[in-house]
């Protein structure tokens, strides 16, 4: 079964919508081959163009997935996504467009090592221009001890120079499975006046 999803959307200057999402081409697992595709809508999402590859995974990668798009304060479009190289190296990637999504810079990794999980639609820009992207680094992903496989160090990547350089915030939280894992569902809670 194929899988498509983990998308992000941004409004272009002409009022049309640009949608980017993960498109897996040989299965639905996180290890399946896949890339990031784009579609556009000129009628507020009532109809969409055919999909076109936006970021193509190379032969050294299993897939590209979990894209975030953002209009930056300087007018450029930014994109982050994951580059799943193998089961122990998955860096977040960074690319920008100066022509409203017609072309993009060569994506480059934000880190040189580690297995990072970054969900789609997470990139933000703060009032002072700082870019921030939350992550979970899985440090024991290939450990034979099953109790360690879900361990993650959660933190924030940030850039103060428009994405040229990325750093990790000095503050992080270590997640151990079952310790502060969210519930499988959230009950609807009525708001009080």
Image: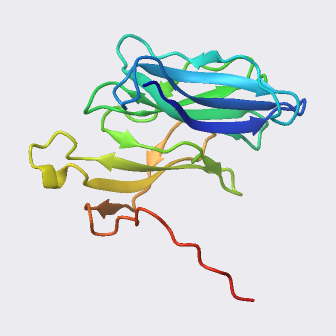
Q: Nearer the viewer, residue 12 or 28?
A: 28
Picture quadrant of residue 103: top right
- Residue 99 appears at what percent x and percent y? 78, 22
Question: Residue shown at 61%/41% (left/top)?
Answer: 161
Quadrant in the picture for the N terminus: top left
**Rendered-image quadrant of the C terminus:** bottom right
Q: Residue at x 9, y 43 (%)?
A: 144
Q: At x 71% / y 16%, what residue is drawn? A: 50
**Residue 150 drawn at (x, y percent):** 25, 52
Residue 26, compared with residue 31, is above or below; it is: above
24 in relation to 112, above or below = above
Task: Tell me which residue sits at (88%, 31%) in the image.
Answer: 43
Residue 106, can we see it? yes
Is residue 150 rendered to the left or right of residue 25?
left
Farthest-out residue, front: 1
Viewer can see residue 68: no
Q: Is residue 40 left or right of residue 53?
A: right
Q: Is residue 74 above or below residue 61?
A: below
Residue 126 drawn at (x, y percent) = 66, 55
Residue lying furthest bottom: 193
Q: Position of residue 192 (x, y in %)?
A: 69, 88
Q: Nearer the viewer, residue 83 or 145?
A: 145
Q: Looking at the image, which is closer to me, 163 or 50?
A: 50
73 vs 133, left or right, is: right
Looking at the image, residue 16 lies above or below residue 125: above
């Amino acid at each position: 079964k194929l899988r498509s999803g983990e998308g992000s959307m941004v409004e272009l200057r002409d009022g049309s919508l640009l949608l980017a999402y993960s498109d897996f081409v040989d299965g639905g697992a996180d290890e399946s081959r896949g890339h990031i595709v784009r579609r556009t809508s000129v009628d507020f999402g009532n109809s969409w163009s055919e999909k076109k590859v936006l970021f193509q995974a190379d032969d050294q990668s299993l897939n590209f997935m979990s894209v975030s798009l953002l209009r930056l304060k300087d007018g450029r479009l930014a994109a982050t996504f994951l580059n799943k190289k193998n089961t122990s190296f998955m860096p977040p990637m960074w690319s920008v467009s100066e022509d409203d999504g017609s072309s993009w810079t060569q994506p480059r990794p934000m880190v040189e090592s580690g297995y990072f999980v970054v969900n789609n639609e997470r990139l933000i820009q703060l009032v002072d221009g700082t870019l921030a992207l939350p992550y979970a680094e899985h440090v024991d992903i290939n450990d034979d001890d099953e109790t360690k496989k879900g361990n993650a160090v959660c933190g924030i990547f940030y850039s103060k120079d428009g994405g040229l350089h990325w750093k990790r915030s000095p503050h992080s939280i270590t997640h151990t499975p079952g310790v502060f894992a969210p519930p499988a569902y959230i009950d609807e809670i009525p708001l009080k006046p």
